[in-house]
């Protein structure tokens, strides 16, 4: 995992915790994205820090809460921008944080929970040692589901990497059931077939 992320990740976690205290409102968050893939022992280059977050009330429906959270982050030396889409948008609410003074080359995206299964995934997150800090990381199964839902080329490569790691935390039965509920079975089966094909090809080459 890229060690230059360590101090930035530490600062971001403290910023979210500070905002939670100042707003007197719990903000639950967990690492997702490339760093989450790396946290599960898979080498993965990335230039971003990504979180999934949830709160009650949610800034998705509370404009004043969005303003207050932005003001707190700006006050602590960041540049925070809310990016909003429609309710049918795959990402209806995202908070982009740029630490312009401390780490101008890095940015962080906080995706706010907007689906029931995302909230359940956040509750299932596991505390992991990430670059010297204990931080909640999305469970590998939930991370796979989130990446299947995103469906981008890198997301599907990450799915195959997570599946190939053979983590004891991954139950293929549970994963297939979750994918079926969210109508993601076809994508999951495609990833499994491609992974199986790659393994057979590697085995064939090794026998030559």
Image: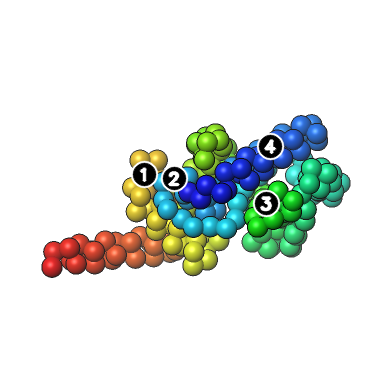
Closer to the camera, 110 or 74?
A: 74
Per the image, the residue denoted by label 3 is 103
Crowding around mark 2 (Cα neighbors within 10 Å: few <14, some 14 to 19, many 20+) is some
- Give the CA distance from mark 3 to mark 4: 15 Å
Residue 198: x and y in percent read: 29, 65
Observer-side mark, 4 or 1, equals 4
Q: Earlier in the sequence, mark 1 or mark 2?
A: 2
- Give the CA distance from mark 1 to mark 3: 33 Å
28, above or below 172, in the image = above
Per the image, the residue denoted by label 1 is 167
Residue at 51% over, 40% down: 130
Per the image, the residue denoted by label 2 is 40
Residue at 68% over, 63% down: 89
Crowding around mark 4 (Cα neighbors within 10 Å: few <14, some 14 to 19, many 20+) is few
Per the image, the residue denoted by label 4 is 14
- Secondary structure under the numbered disc 4 in the rendered image: helix
Q: Quadrant of the C terminus?
A: bottom left
Closer to the camera, 98 or 86?
A: 98
Crowding around mark 3 (Cα neighbors within 10 Å: few <14, some 14 to 19, many 20+) is some
């Amino acid at each position: 995992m890229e060690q230059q992320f360590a101090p930035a990740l530490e600062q971001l976690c403290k910023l979210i915790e500070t905002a939670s205290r100042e707003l007197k409102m719990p903000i639950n968050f967990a690492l997702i994205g490339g760093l989450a893939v790396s946290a599960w022992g898979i080498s993965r280059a990335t230039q971003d820090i990504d979180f999934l977050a949830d709160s009650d009330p949610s800034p998705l429906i509370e404009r004043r809460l969005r303003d207050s959270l932005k003001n707190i982050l700006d006050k602590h030396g960041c540049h925070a921008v809310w990016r909003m889409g429609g309710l049918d948008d795959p990402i209806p609410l995202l908070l982009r944080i740029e630490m312009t003074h401390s780490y101008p080359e890095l940015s962080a995206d906080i995706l706010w929970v907007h689906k029931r299964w995302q909230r359940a995934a956040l509750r299932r997150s596991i505390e992991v040692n990430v670059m010297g800090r204990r931080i909640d990381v999305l469970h590998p199964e939930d991370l796979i589901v989130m990446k299947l839902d995103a469906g981008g080329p890198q997301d599907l490569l990450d799915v195959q990497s997570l599946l190939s790691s053979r983590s004891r935390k991954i139950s293929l039965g549970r994963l297939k059931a979750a994918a079926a509920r969210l109508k993601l079975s076809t994508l999951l089966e495609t990833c499994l077939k491609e992974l199986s094909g790659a393994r057979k090809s590697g085995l064939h080459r090794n026998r030559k």
